[in-house]
Image (cartoon, rainbow, N blue to C red):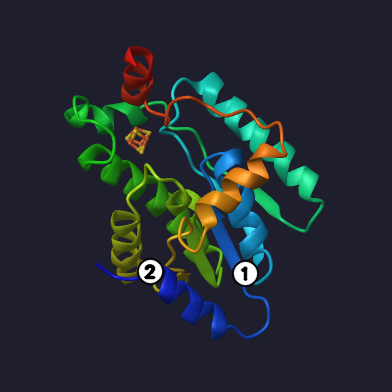
Amino acid sequence: MNNYQKLFKQEIASLKGRPSLLLHVCCGPCSVYPLKLLSRYFKITIYYANSNIYPYEEYTKRLNELERYRKMLNSDIEIVIGSYDSDYQKYLSPFKDQKEGLDRCALCYMLRMKEAFAYADKNAYDYITTVMTISNHKNADYINYIGTKLSEVYKHTRFLYANLKKDGGIDKNRQLNAKLDLYHQNYCGCIYSKHLAKQI
Ligand code: SF4
């Protein structure tokens, strides 16, 4: 198991200037601390690639909350919105009975990160990463491994390794969120996680 937060700090220490970063963001609450932290070092563009979110109204609601938070920051952070793939749930369906955090989620991270990586590489961003490692429910090893594999395909943009929940990141995110009135969803996103949340 790699220490991805150590790799993150090494990369930050080696930066020259303020490079561009395409930051995959899944929702407003998960972006609060990562945006504060990363905007110290990078010129950030948020990439909202989240066709996993079901139904579409929920996808829009989370996007609107993210937009609301971005405007609160009053910074130069921009946002690009990926297209919503209404067939997305069918890719996950072979793993519909799995609990969260296994193969279905690994595939889901990969599909969204691939979309973001392709966009970053095509548009010559210096770096790419995702806020998803801030979540206790998301496997940072899977996410960073996917970043490694996608780096072999998309050669221009460099993957920024990170485990944002480390170094107190998860607590800082919680504390910052407590001061905001952002909408907090009660399920991860896909139809299967929504059904699971109903049973709990
Ligand atoms: S639980 Fe979340 S990460 Fe896992 S497949 Fe569903 S939406 Fe994707």
- Quadrant in which ligand 1 is drawn: top left
Residue that appears at 55% across and 44% down:
30
Against 34, is 191 above or below?
Answer: above
From the image, which quarter does the C terminus lie in?
A: top left
Camera-nearest residue between 40 and 110: 40
Give the residue type that dot 1 points to. Ser
Image quadrant where residue 179 sits: top right
| Left or right position of 173 against 164 | right
Question: How would you rate the neighbour count of disc 2 (Cα within 10 Å): few for under 14, some for 14-19, many for 20 or more?
Answer: some
| Image coords of residue 195 (percent x, y) | 34, 16
Q: Tell me the mark number nearer the camera, choosing from 2 and 1.
A: 2
Name the spot of residue 100 as percent of width and height, x first: 28, 34
**Label 2: which secondary element:** helix
The foreground one among 200 and 140 is: 200
Q: Quadrant of the N terminus?
A: bottom left
| Label located before the other in sequence (2 or 1) | 2
- Is 9 rendered above or below residue 111? below
For residue 99, above or below residue 27 = above
Tag 1 residue: 20
Residue on which disc 2 sits: 4
Q: Is residue 13 left or right of residue 192?
A: right
